[in-house]
Image (cartoon, helix red, strand yellow):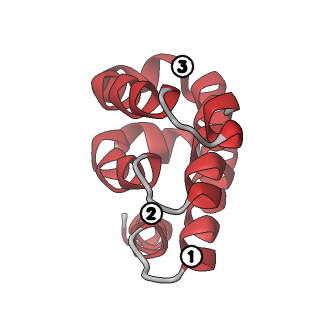
């Protein structure tokens, strides 16, 4: 259990970091954890999305675009495990459909 919490704590601290590059690393780590430890992510999906949702409404376009791209990937990996956070997902995606940034809108 303790060894399971370590990657999650790292993920949370990266996703809420002040630095742009560090937040980007957090988004990339989420995708990596979804691929390597889908059960860990599925079990903690609500807490994880409390942090990840912040990146979907990120003010910096590069981070937001990366988060949206990763969201598309993890949706395919986690499928039904996303059910508890589907409202967060829809809100995050909907907010970004109106983006004036072509990269964000496309993502």
Q: Are marks 3 and 2 in contact (CB under 8 Å)?
A: no
Q: Residue at x 33, y 28 (%)?
A: 91
For the residue pair 32 and 86, the one nearer the viewer reads as 86
Residue drawn at x 48%, y 67% as measured from the top left? 11
Residue 79 marker: 3
| Numbered disc in front, either 1 or 2 | 1
Disc 3 crowd rating (10 Å Cα; few below 14, some 14-19, many 20+) is few
Q: Between tags 3 and 1, which lies in front? A: 1
Residue designated by label 1: 20
Tell whether 69 sits left or right of 26.
right
Q: In terms of sequence position, does the residue under pointer 3 or pointer 2 come before the other?
A: 2
Q: Quadrant of the C terminus?
A: top right
Q: Secondary structure at mark 1?
A: helix
The answer to whether the residue labelled 3 contacts the one labelled 1, judged by CB atoms less than 8 Å apart, is no
Residue 29 lies, in percent from the top left, at 62, 61
Can you tell which quarter of the image residue 100 is in?
top right
Q: Secondary structure at mark 2?
A: helix
Q: Residue at x 58, y 26 (%)?
A: 75
Instruction: Name the residue tied to disc 2.
Output: 4
């Amino acid at each position: 259990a303790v060894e399971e919490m370590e990657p999650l704590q790292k993920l949370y601290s990266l996703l809420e970091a002040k630095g742009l590059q560090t937040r980007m690393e957090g988004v990339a780590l989420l995708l990596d954890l979804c691929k390597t430890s889908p059960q860990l992510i599925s079990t903690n999906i609500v807490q994880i999305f409390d942090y990840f949702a912040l990146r979907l409404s990120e003010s910096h376009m590069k981070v937001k675009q990366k988060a949206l791209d990763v969201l598309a990937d993890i949706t395919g990996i986690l499928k039904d495990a996303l059910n508890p956070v589907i409202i967060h997902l829809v809100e995050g995606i909907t907010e970004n459909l109106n983006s004036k940034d072509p990269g964000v809108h496309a993502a």
